[in-house]
Image (tube, grey):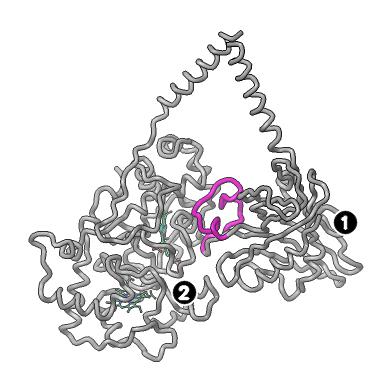
Amino acid sequence: MKYRILFFTFCICALGLISFQFKSEPTIIEFNVPKKWPKPIYSFQNNPLTEEGFQLGRKLFYDPILSRDSTISCASCHLQYTGFTHVDHNVSHGIEGRKGTRNSPVLINLAWNSTFHWDGGVNHLEVQGINPIQHPAEMDDKLENVLKKLNASSVYPDLFKKAFGSDKITSSTLMKALTLFTVSLVSSDSKYDKVMRKEKGVQFSEQEKNGLKIFRNNCAVCHKEPLFTSTTFASNGLKMDSLLKDVGRYAITHNPTDSMLFKIPTLRNVEFTFPYMHDGRYKKLKDVINYYSDGIDPSVSYLSKPLKPFHFNDTEKKDLLSFLLTLTDKAFLYNPRYSFPK
Amino acid sequence: MIRKSSLIVSFLMVLFLGFGQTTSLKITFQPRISNETIELNKVYALNDSVQLEITTCRFYVSNFSFFSKGKLLSQQKSAFLLDLEHPTSLDLSFPSMDFDGIQFNLGVDSSTNVAGILDGDLDPIKGMYWTWNSGYINFKLEGSITNNTGKKIPFEYHLGGYLSPYPTIQTISVETEQAENIVIQLDLQHFISAIDVNSCSNVMIPGAKAVELSKLLSNCFKI
């Protein structure tokens, strides 16, 4: 009797050990916070950053399986070499060419954001991905249906098992995988960064230096360094588009003082993220600078401080533009780790 | 040796008993019209002239606390989705204890609303989540009323929102004399009768109206 019990316990322990040995753990990788940057908002506590999870998220990001008719992937509206935004269109184009109502934002340094979308309506990066999947003018599918397709696929269950320990794909593991990819899109290697880090042989030209001064005096309150956004909401005085009638943050909070406020976008890689603003109304960076210089209507009631028409002269405009171009980070825009997985 | 093995056996028994113990208190939620338990898609007469039909009734209850003489005995921080379409979801189990008061939330608390993607009853595919304005729908009631002229007015109340100044979560306290097999009734007749369905047939976003209706609902629970 007693030996049998002992033997039994031994067997159970041994079995446990063996199965433990066979279950390969995903490889934890570190999330690198650039020197002197603030602490990221996204905590990896419930979603540890792993190589398997990142690669799975990357594959999903580029896979049109997430749309109803398998024609649109996340990358259709978020292209790497434009800072992960749409090119050419003022508002995003989705399934069957349907038009959305807003310009797709860049996906850069999302780990430092606490709200998402132009109106900040999305409160966590992990739940953002449900929006494009279900939006009738984006991927127009149902989350249940996407999960069904993924669970029935010949490759995904195995990849989810490697990343999250279970081959049953759920909303939670799908969203966490997408998040591990998008949260890893960190741009911190522009000329501006190199100058700030005092890297050998990298210096601002006189023009860029003047541009930085103008920027710090007039723009940096909202487009705050080093993220080039304070990640809060403001109005730069743009008037409402008469067709889109977008009231911005007000649609979420119903607070009259939030009317016409939009999330301040980062200016990193701004050289390539055209068209600009929530409705993509400006095609060229020059147009934006001209707007801030002479286009602002100071009588607009929702205009945020300290904005006013800045009346830059031609040299100042050129200086400012040349500074903005130092925010281009080619190592980010062409990083093979973020590109279409081969 | 003999002693050791009997130790193992008694340990297993304690474990077993322990598990048995943890599920012996049953709390059942019963959405009602007058004195009947509601069936979906059935027509009820609210009074001589108005009929009511409910097609969806689904809501979250969360964070149950049990009290004895005002003293907190136990607290459980989880959320349950109750759905008339799945009657077993209306039965909740808790560890049994000697209590005389229960407190719970109608809805999901704000920390859960900002916690990112969640599983189980809180999975967004349960249809109780707003995606473009992230947050849970605490309470969903859909159906129609038909007035004496035969006009049918459909209604949809999706109550939710956690942000100040319009948080919709409600704390509900009930007292009880017995500490097992509790039935908590939700009097929806009281709720619908207090709303002018004609002028307010749709509430689908967070805001003042959602708060008003949530407060009204919180007065419709009783033992």
Q: Is B204 placed left or right of A73 in the picture? A: right
Would you name the residue on which mark 2 appears?
A248
Residue A94: x and y in percent read 43, 60
Which residue does the image show at 87% across and 62% down from the upper left? Answer: B45
Q: Say which quarter of the image contains residue B141.
A: bottom right
Residue A199: x and y in percent read 13, 60
Label 2 neighbour load within 10 Å: few <14, some 14-19, many 20+: many
| Viewer-nearest of discs 2 and 1 | 1
Residue in the foreground of this view, choosing between A218 and B20: B20
Task: Specify the amino acid type for callout 2.
Answer: Gly
Which residue does the image show at 40% across and 65% down from the upper left? Answer: A92
Query: In the image, is residue A255 above or below residue A81?
Result: below
Q: Chain of mark 1?
A: B
Query: In the image, is residue A162 above or below residue A246?
Result: above
Bounds of the magenta segment:
B110-132
Task: Specify the amino acid type for callout 1.
Answer: Asn
Q: Which mark is residue B104?
A: none
| Quadrant in which the C terminus of chain A appears | top left
Q: Say which quarter of the image contains residue B11.
A: top right
Residue at disc 1, secondary structure: loop
Would you name the residue on which mark 1 appears?
B35
Residue A51: x and y in percent read 33, 41
Q: Is A230 placed left or right of B89 in the picture? A: left
Q: Is A140 placed left or right of A196 in the picture? A: right
